[in-house]
Amino acid sequence: MDEQQQHLRYLIIDDFDQMRVSFKGMLSCYGATDVTTVSSGEKALKLLANNSYDVVICDYNLGEGKDGQQVLEESRHLGYLGHAATFFMITAESNMPMVMSALEHQPDDYMVKPINRDVLHHRLTVALKRKRQLKEIDDALVRDDKLAAIELCRGRSGKDLKQRLYLAKLQAELCLDIKRYSEAEKIFKEILEIRDFPWARFGLCKIRFLSADYESAESGFRELIEQNHLYLEVYDWLVKLLQARDETLEAQRLLQDAVQLSPKAVARQRKLGKLAAVNGDIDGAEKAYQAAIRWGRYSCFAKAIEYRRLAEIYQERGSISKVVRLLVEGRKRFSAQPVERIQMLCGQALSQRRHQGTGAVVDDYLEEVMRLIDTHKKDMTAEHLFTTADECFQLAKHEEAKQLLQILLSNHHDDDKWVERVTELMLRHGRENEVAQLMTIARGELEEIHVKCTELLRNERLQQAITLLNEAIDQYPRNRTLMLMAAGAMINYMHDNGMDQGYHFRCRYSLNRLLERDRQDQDAGRFLKMLNKITPSRVEESVGGQYG
Amino acid sequence: MDNMDKAGDAINLTSAFAMVSHDIKNSLGILLKFIGMLSENCELEQCGMTHQCADMEYEVRRINNNLVKLLTLFKADEGVYLLNVDAHSVKDFLDEALLEHGVILRQKGIEYEVECDHELYWYFDRNLMMGVMGNAISNALRYTSDRIRLTAEASPRGLAIGVEDNGDGFPAGMLERQSGVMNPESGFLNNNTGLGLYFTQTVLDLHQHDGIRGHVKLANHADQSGGIFSILLP
C-alpha cells in the first residue's frame, strides 16, 4: 500500500463480526490506520452523515435491515458520499440484480467473496487510480454541471479502452438527461456496433419512448426484460410507457413482478400501491403501501403519501384504531421533514375532525402546518400546496386555504392547468366568487415585475433586468415565466459579453429544473440548446472506432 | 425469507441444490478467512505448518471454485445468467487471477510471471472469466514443479490467453479426448478436468460475438516439459 492509501479513512460495513475483523486486519496489514467498522446499514448511514470517508467497503447482504445497495443509494442521495469517495460492494455471487441498476446507483467496483488481502489491495489500487483520473468529471457532477461533465467526457477520449467506454456511457446518459437525444442516440448506436451491451439498447429504447415512439420502445423494453429478467430499471420505464397508454392493469402486473424481485425499493412499492388503487385492487394497494412503509422506516426515500393512503384504506374498512396509530407513527417518522410532516398533520387533523369533531387539537395541527409552510415555502411543490389547501377547506379553514392557493398561483400564474385546477377547487368549496380576486393579486404582482423588466430592457439595462428577475425568482422559486425570462436575458447577455460563470450556473440550474418538471417543455429545451451553443465546446467529433 | 412460504410446495431438487450451494459458499468464505489468518500466523512464527496451511487453502479454494462452476453452469442452463460485459485491462485481470492464489504461490515457493501488454484491453465478464482462470491456475498449481506463466495476446479472432506450467504435462489420453468435451457420451465429463473444460467452453460461448465462438485447448510444450491451457476469447 503506498503512503497515500495508508492515510485514507476507511469504513467497513458487514454484519458478520469475523468479516469485519478480517477486512480490518487486511487493511492494517498494508499500513492503513484509520479503519472504522460497523455492523448494519442503519448505523453506517449515521456514521456517513457525520464523518467523511475515502473508501467504503460494504457487504451487499447485511441481514435484517437495509442492504448494501440501499446504503449506497441513500448515502449518495443524501450527499453523504461525494463522488470523491470510493465505494466497494462485496457480494457472495457475481450475478446480482444491482449490476443492472442505473449508473448513478452503481458502486465503483464489485468484489466477489472470498477476498484475500492481495486481491483487496490490488483492487483498491486500481480503483483509486481510476478515481483520480476521473476527478474533474466527478467534481462537475457534484456541481450538477452536466454540460461541463459532457465536455470533459468528450475531451477524455484518449485514455484507455475501459475509461473510453465508461465516459461514452456517462456522456450518453447525461445527454439523455438534458434532452440532447440525437447526441445520445449516436453514442449508443456506436457502442452497439462494438458489442451488444444491454444498457446501450436500453438507452435507445428510452430515447424512443421520450420521442413518443411507444410501439418500438415497448418491444425493446420487453425484449430487454426477457433477456435480463433482473434488469429492474427497464420495468420502471415500461410501466411509465404503459401508464402513458392507460394500460394500468398490465402496468400493475409488471410492477408486481419487479417488486417481487426486489422488495426493498420504497418508491416502486409506493407506485405499485397507487396503480393497484387505480385498478380498484384495494388489497393489493394495502399490501404495497404497507411494504413501502416497512422498508421506508429507516429510509430517506419514505414519503407521507404511503401513510396517508394506507390510512384511507383503513378508514374505508372502519379500522379507526389502526388509522390513528398509523397517523401518529407517520407524524413522528417525519419530524425532521417539514413537507412530509405537513401532510401527516393534515391527515391527523382530518381524522380528528371526522371522529371527534372540531376542537383545539385541530387548531393546533393547523397552526403548525401554516408555520411550517411559511418557513419552507421553497420546498413545497404546487401539488403539495394544492392538496393541503383542499384539506384546509375540508377542515373549514378557508383563510388558510386561500393563503396557500395564493402562494401556488404566484408561482404558477402562467400555467393554465393550475389556474384551472384552483378555480375548480374553489368552485367545489363554494368560493367561486373569490377566484378572480386570487388571480388578480397573483397576476398583478408578476405584471409589475414584467413591466419593470421590459422598461429596463428597452433602455438596454440588461444586467439590471437580470438582477430584478433573479430576485423575483428567489421569491417565487417555481415560476416558469420568470425562470424563462431570466434565462433568456442571461443567455443574451453572455452571447454579447462572453461567459459569466454565475449566470451560466443559474441559467442551467433553472432550465434543468424546468425540464425535470416537464421533459417536453419546448421553451426550456430551446433555451438549453441556445445555452449549449454559447458554451465553448469542441467540434463534435466522431467517437466511433475508439472502442475496438 | 419472504419467498419461502410461496416456494413451500414448489421446492424442487434444482432450487434446493442452488440454495444449499450458496450456503456452502458462504461457509467456505468464512473458512478461507480463518485459514488466511492461520497462514499469516504461521508465516510470522515460522511454525513449520506453512505447507499444511497452503494445502488446506488450496483444497478449500478448489471446493469453492467447483461450486462457482456448478452455480454458473446451473444459471447458464436455466438461461438466467446475466452477462456483465465491460472493458477490462487484461494485465490487471491476470495479475488479480494470480493474486487470488497469492498465499499458496508464496508458501510453495512457486515462481510466476505474467506476459501481457499493459495497454491491452478486452471486453468480457470479469467474474465469469475469473472463474475460468481460477480453474486453470488451480490445475497448473497442482501439477507444476516450480513455475507458472500467464500469457495474453490479441489476435483478429480474439484474445488468446495461456496458462503454462513446467510439470509433467497433460497425459496423452486426456489430450486425445479433449475434443469430446461438448459431447456427453465421450465420458470425458466424468472427471474434474472434463468439468473444468466444459465450464470454460460454456463461459466462452456466453461471450460469443460477431458469430465467432471461443475455444479452449490443452497441449504440452514441445521442447520442454509442462502443460499449456489455452483459450481464445472472442
Image (cartoon, rainbow, N blue to C red):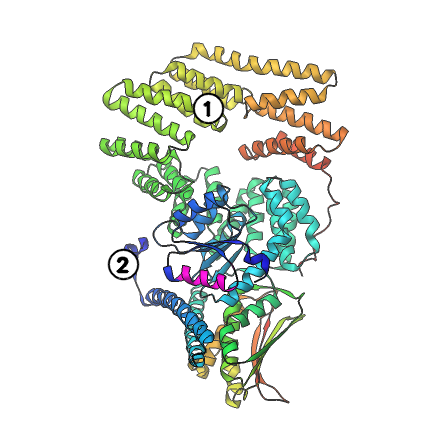
Disc 1 designates what residue? Answer: A375
Instruction: Give whichever of A526, A33 is nearer the camera.
Output: A33
Range drawn in magenta: A19-32
Q: Residue at x 52, y 49 (%)?
A: A102
Q: Is residue A469 visible?
A: yes
Q: Residue at x 45, y 27 (%)?
A: A383
**How dense is the environment of label 2, judged by Cα within 10 Å: few (below 14), some, or many (20 and up)?**
few
Q: Position of residue A254 (x, y in %)?
A: 41, 47
Q: Answer with left or right where residue A532 lies relative to residue B171.
A: right
Q: Label 2 amino acid?
A: Gly
Image quarter in which the N terminus of chain A is found: bottom right
Return the mark for residue A511: none
Up the image or down, A336 lies above or below B103; here it is: above
Q: Position of residue B14 (x, y in %)?
A: 35, 67
Instruction: Give whichever of A365, A35 is nearer the camera.
Output: A35
Alpha carbon distance from label 2 to label 1:
53 Å
For disc 2, the chain is: B
The count of marks equals 2
Instruction: Give whichever of A85, A308 is nearer the camera.
Output: A85
Q: Residue furthest right?
A: A496
SS label for mark 1: helix
Instruction: Give whichever of A468, A313 is nearer the camera.
Output: A468
Q: Is residue B80 visible?
A: no
Q: Residue at x 61, y 32 (%)?
A: A511
Residue A60 quadrant: bottom left
Disc 2 designates what residue? Answer: B8
Magenta-highlighted stretch: main secondary structure? helix
For disc 1, the chain is: A
SS label for mark 2: helix
**Mark 2, mark 1: which one is toward the viewer?**
1
Q: Position of residue A453 (x, y in %)?
A: 66, 17
